[in-house]
Image (spheres, rainbow, N blue to C red):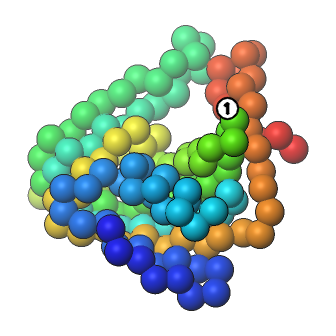
Amino acid sequence: MKYKKIENHYIVRIDKGEEVIAKITELCLKENITLGSITGIGATNNVTIGLYDTEAKKYNKNTLLEPLEITSLTGNISTMDGKPYLHLHITVGNKDNIVYGGHLNECFISATCELHILKIDGEMDRYFDPEIGLNLYKI
């Protein structure tokens, strides 16, 4: 991963073989990013996405192992228990232009990934809500 900081913006390149969530978390720790937004594009050949089942209160996960274009990666950065907490969604398309999307669980880069991260001054913590079964903003 390489990055450049311009004011409160980070221009990030995640390289082939690197895992997206691990690299963004590493950057958040290094640069003390506790609140922010993320957008990005790129390419993967190994991504796990999920859909939250509100009745069962669990994620149904699907791993895709094929060449895929990351057409959109978006989400936010907050904290939970004093650590960076990433909430990311991803949309990927295959060679036939079939598109898959959902909550991002894991994504390994096959060529490159270009991200823009906006650091927001402040903090937003999360807590686990047992009724919903998700980690929600403490507002």
Query: Where on the picture, by quarter, is residue 44?
Result: bottom left
Instruction: Judge whether residue 94 can be spotted in this image.
Output: no
Q: Residue at x 18, y 62 (%)?
A: 16
Dot 1, crowdedness within 10 Å: few (<14), some or many (≥20)?
some
Residue at which label 1 appears:
135
The vertical placement of 56 against 113, above or below, is: above
Does residue 90 appear left or right of residue 5 in this picture?
A: left
Q: Tell me the quarter of the image containing the N terminus.
A: bottom left
Q: Residue at x 68, y 57 (%)?
A: 34
Q: Position of residue 69 (x, y in %)?
A: 24, 61
Extreme residue in the bottom direction:
6
Q: Residue at x 19, y 56 (%)?
A: 17
The vertical placement of 84 against 24, above or below, is: above
Extreme residue in the right direction:
139
Q: Tell me the quarter of the image containing the C terminus.
A: top right
Secondary structure at numbered mark 1: strand
